[in-house]
Image (cartoon, helix red, strand yellow):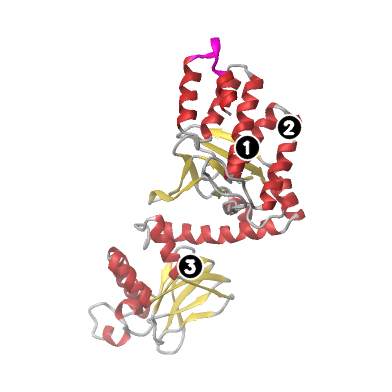
Amino acid sequence: MPGFLEDLFSGGKQEKDFRELQQKILQNRKNHHLLVKLGDLLEKKGRRAEALEAYREASERFSRSGFLIQAIAVNKILLRLDPSQDQIQEQLATLYAERGISAWEGGAGANSPLPVIPLFSGLKKDEFLSLMQKIRGRQFRQGEFPCRQGDRGDSLFVISRGKVAIFREDPGKGKIFLNTLQEGDFFGEFAFFSQSPRTATVETLEETEILEISKGDLDDLIREFPGVSQVLWNFYKERVADTLVATSELFRSFSPPERKRLLEMFIPQDFAVGALILEEGQPGDSLYLIKKGEVEVFTRDLQGGILPLARLKEGDFFGEISLITGRPRTASVKARQAVELLRLQKADFNQILKIHPEILTVLEESLRYRLGNKLMALGVFRESPKKERIL
């Protein structure tokens, strides 16, 4: 590369922008993105051959350093400028398959494994090569929106450079921050699996490059290589749970790292339609968060008849009364449809309270509201002495 730089910046070619980039590249030899910027500048100046050389050097450096996503992004630029360069895809796929990179300027040693990239981990060489051929690169300035909540979800995105913020607009709650994603992360799998519009907005926090795979191409890839679907499905389940917690009234004050630790505490439980989840009068030591589906909360009158109290759906919680008071369950809960729940045990709940005591206020307010509903359903006034026997 030094020879290329010397030739590029010799004589009358030493324009101000090029000189500044030259110095940055020589001073930051491990910042390969500067070479991409150099290629961009050369391309804008109409110096196509030199731009190709800069991009090729950037691709090689990214590959040797194990930055697979970034190498793919640069290769897409190379193929756009010169479609005859298709051998670079094969070379990168071979490198990926070997899981090793050579030493370069004090970087990773020979045969060091490539970094794990969620979407690509576990793919064989032919699967990986097929995926690369379907990807297209896109560039965004800071403050732009690769996708917005409510948009049609027909693409999956992988970040090759930069950083984005994920947030959701919730009526009555405003803008809810969900997470920050950076190089190697992907998003857009919600719409792919749910066949519904985008559930969140993505905003670039800095200049960002993104690799996009259309839903049609992804469907073709999954039909050919079913293993890709499992990778996406695992991340989809994690993101669903994380989004559920982030938008929950109980846990909205938690930071992304705190949400991650909280999710590790939850125990997933599934119930078929009609199943009895909680029974009135039984001991209770857990809080439940509804991940998917709908439940009915009910009690019984003195003759044993059912008195409906509430219907709860995705994002709602229940079980808090026994958790706070230590008394038996004050109502029964059954599944109105197949439900997926996240159960938080009392010991873990107590740990969380030490860090976030504010959630107790939310739970106590819910407790008063739900006990009041039960008294009204039973025809008992709050000032009645019968209240103590019912609770």
Nearer to the camera, 389 or 189: 189
User: Which residue corresponds to the image point at 66% horizontal and 36% vertical from the top-left?
Assistant: 75
- Which amino acid, by three-letter code, is at mark 2? Gln
In the picture, residue 353 is in which quadrant?
bottom left
Give how far apart the Cα atoms at labels 3 and 1 are.
48 Å
The residue that label 3 is drawn on is 290
Q: Secondary structure at mark 1?
A: helix
Q: Is label 3 or label 1 in front?
A: 1
In the picture, residue 331 is in which quadrant?
bottom left
Task: Identify the mark at residue 60; answer none if there is no mark.
Answer: 1
Q: Secondary structure at mark 3?
A: strand
| Contact check, label 3 and label 1, Cβ < 8 Å | no
Crowd rating for badge 1 (residues with CA inside 10 Å; few <14, some 14–19, many 20+): some
Q: Is residue 276 visible?
A: yes
Q: Which span is picked out in magenta?
A: 8-15
Which quadrant of the figure contains the N terminus? top right
Give how far apart the Cα atoms at labels 2 and 1 are.
13 Å
The residue that label 2 is drawn on is 85
Whichever of callouts 3 and 2 sits on the residue coming sooner in the sequence is 2
Crowd rating for badge 2 (residues with CA inside 10 Å; few <14, some 14–19, many 20+): some
| Image spot of residue 351 (x, y percent) | 33, 71
Question: As displayed, is residue 176 above or below residue 62?
Answer: below
Decide whether residue 14 is among the magenta residues: yes
Extreme residue toward the bottom, this view: 303
Extreme residue toward the top, this view: 12
User: Which residue corresponds to the image point at 51% horizontal and 43% vertical from the top-left?
Assistant: 106
